[in-house]
Image (cartoon, rainbow, N blue to C red):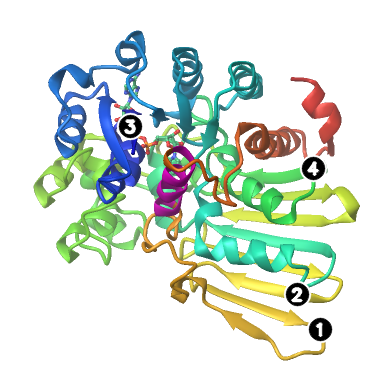
Amino acid sequence: MITVAILGAGARGRNAYGLKFSKFPDDIKVVAVADLDAEKLRICGDDHNIPENMRFTSGEEMLKQPKLADVLFVCTQDRDHFGHTMAGLEKGYDIVLEKPISPSLEECKAIAEKAAELGRKVLVCHVLRYTAFYTKLKDLIDTNTIGELVTVNAEEEVGYWHQAHSFVRGNWRNSVESSPMILAKCCHDMDILLWLIGKKCLKVSSFGSLKHFTADNAPEGSADRCCNCPEEIKKNCIFEVEKFYIDGPIGIKNGYTGWPRKVVEGKDPTVENVTEALRTGPYGRCVYKCDNDVVDNQIVNMRLEDNVTVNFTMSAFSEKINRTIRIRGTKGEIVADWGSDEIKLTVFGKKPEIFHPNNDASAGTGDTGGHGGGDMGLVKGVISLFANGIPSKSTTYIDKSIESHFVALAAEESRLNDGKVIDMEEWINKF
Ligand SMILES: NC(=O)c1ccc[n+]([C@@H]2O[C@H](COP(=O)([O-])OP(=O)(O)OC[C@H]3O[C@@H](n4cnc5c(N)ncnc54)[C@H](O)[C@@H]3O)[C@@H](O)[C@H]2O)c1
């Protein structure tokens, strides 16, 4: 049995992790929680029957106390991770830290150094590694089924409505307030690519832009909020919010009440409270009139050790939220589609083999929601590591996770400098 303190009881702290802990009452127990929002604090406190004296109105208050639990989950926003994690390490906690570690590479390094100095574990929530899908890909690569790796092409399809929700209207729309898109969204991809390939990245270049979600593309006569927009414009606008959250295929009226509707209202969503939140809150704004600056498309090229080349594309403009990957080796190729849970392995000259990892009871995490089962996989990995002392094969610590952040921020540096090639050794030595 391990005890946990949750710092930040929002979409990740409460919904993605806290509620899952309740499924393992013999292994993990939440004993303390902190949130600035009184209602979120109450809800999460009640989820776990936490006594009043262990509910804190801020992380700062919680971290003034002596160590309260074995593990601290830091689930606040990107720019708060550094302060909360450094204070948590000083208090003696091992830490499970939401990604990104921090938007600042100096801060990422400082956390890694502090953890090493104090001999504490910091596990970054790279949840994709814990999915049955990526674990299977890793096994196929590590067992040399396709020989030496040569090229990898990966694509992240963000999904048009997900982009609008999170990266135009929502928490990660503005790189100054949160992080650049390539870090906020794609540090998962950088991490999974480095983890799958198992080699260091030597050079990076990148292009990308905010092409569509700008004032220039606002329909003539459109209002600042969907609820005030003329009916004719609303009807033809694919980003009109009622379609997303209320009566569209994933709207509340069709029975969907989880993410992202929960984020719009902050608590448990109903037609009434979400409608009101869209009338007054950030998620009801016109997508062409927000204070967003993060890109809606970006490509990254990488050269890794042993002449492995990688090309990654992120695009907002897809129907589905998905990731695909083509991995080519000297003896065969793997073509994989995360959304359909299909991995096609072709050893050259042989009949292809098809795998559906989530159908394999021994590989699945028992929950395919939440990053394709990755959120549940991470919870199980945390229990295995901290309660039983057995790290899962997906588990590495901050000293490894930081590599994805170096690559992501090198890509951003390149993008901002018209695709300039960044030498990773020189780049890392700057920090
Ligand atoms: N691993 C993943 O796949 C994944 C997915 C989405 C988001 N994230 C990351 O998770 C983090 C949290 O995202 P979220 O969607 O849960 O955000 P959120 O806004 O829903 O939750 C953050 C919570 O922290 C609370 N908070 C802020 N400052 C605080 C303080 N000083 N003390 C106590 N509580 C405080 C807020 O009130 C809020 O409830 C972000 O860094 C985000 O980038 C990770």
Binning the other alpha carbons within 10 Å of mark 1 as few (below 14), some (14 to 19) or many (20 upward) gives few
Residue sitting at the far top: 64
> Residue at 74% across / 44% down in the picture?
206
Q: Nearer the viewer, residue 400 or 156?
A: 400
Asked if the residue at label 3 sits under 8 Å from ligand 1, the reply is: no
Quadrant placement of the N terminus: top left
Q: Nearer the viewer, mark 1 or mark 3?
A: 3
> Residue at 40% across / 36% down in the picture?
290
Identify the disc placed on residue 3.
Answer: 3
Q: Nearer the viewer, mark 3 or mark 2?
A: 3
Sequence order check: which comes first, mark 1 or mark 3? 3
Identify the disc placed on residue 194.
Answer: none
Mark 2 touches mark 1? (CB < 8 Å): yes
User: How far apart, in angstroms, are the residues tagged by discs 3 and 4?
Assistant: 41 Å
User: In the shown orientation, is residue 55 left or right of residue 332?
Assistant: left
User: How far apart, in angstroms, are the residues tagged by discs 2 and 4?
Assistant: 24 Å
Which residue is disc 4 drawn over?
A: 204
Mark 1 touches mark 4? (CB < 8 Å): no
Q: Nearer the viewer, mark 2 or mark 4?
A: 2
Sequence order check: which comes first, mark 2 or mark 4? 4
Sequence order check: which comes first, mark 3 or mark 2? 3
Which residue is disc 1 drawn over?
A: 348
| Magenta-drawn stretch contains 384 | yes
Magenta stretch bounds = 375-386
Sequence order check: which comes first, mark 1 or mark 4? 4
Residue type at numbered disc 2 = Glu
Q: How many marks?
A: 4
Binning the other alpha carbons within 10 Å of mark 3 as few (below 14), some (14 to 19) or many (20 upward) gives some
Which residue is disc 2 drawn over?
A: 333
User: In the shown orientation, is residue 21 left or right of residue 378?
Assistant: left
